[in-house]
Image (cartoon, rainbow, N blue to C red):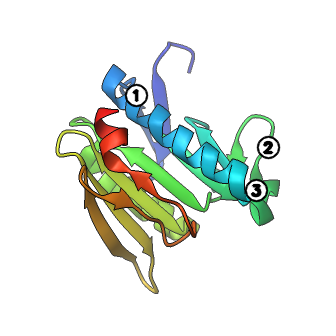
Amino acid sequence: MDDDRDYEVVGGKLIMVPRPRPRHQKIVGRFFTVLENYFRQTAAGEVYIDVDVLLGDQVVSPDLVVVLKERLSIVQETNISGAPDLVVEILSPSTAKYDRKEKSQLYYDSGVQEYWLVDPSLQLIEVYERGEKNWNRSGIYDEEDTLVSPLLPGLQAALRDIFTG
């Protein structure tokens, strides 16, 4: 498609995804900075913004993805071919249900290890880690908290800086 819109293919359906709003983009940028700084210090992986991720015959473009260094071979010239280790989705009113249901299930089924759902309006982040049969919620964080990640030892993100910085 070449019409200046964003699309994803999930469950065999072509889904139009609205372009992010400025606040959404600010939050993505702040998370990118936190994760990029973490990886500069640890050399444990890489973080990417709004890149096409191929999961079988499905194509999605999460807000942020992390690929750990031992799996960087899935990063191709034009996309990521396989499940990232961490996916971050910034919720918006028009995509929240889709991100919580269809995409969440796709990420789990594809082998994503950790999934963050960021709700800018409530200033909350839900962190999910891969369980035996489904996601296990490992934490809910608000703007007063410091986010930690089961997947990224030592990562600490002051959420006040993410939401209001």
Give the residue type that dot 3 points to: Ala
Report helix, strand or loop for mark 2: loop
Q: In this view, does 36 lie to the left or right of 31?
A: right
Q: Quarter of the image containing the N terminus?
A: top right
Task: Determine if residue 59 is in view.
Answer: no
Residue 25 location (% of width, % of height): 41, 27
Q: Distance between the residues labelled 1 and 3?
A: 25 Å
Mark drawn on residue 165? none
* Residue annotated with mark 1: 26
Residue occupying image coordinates x 77% and y 60%:
69
Which type of secondary structure does the marked residue at label 3 adopt? loop
Residue found at the very far left of the displayed protein? 122
Q: Name the residue under label 3.
A: 43
Q: Mark 3, residues whose alpha carbon is within 10 Å: few (<14), some, or many (≥20)?
A: few
**Any part of residue 118 in sight:** yes
Position above or below: 152 against 81: below
Residue 104 locus on image (x, y percent): 39, 60
Q: Residue at x 51, y 69 (%)?
A: 109
Give the amino acid at mark 2.
Gln
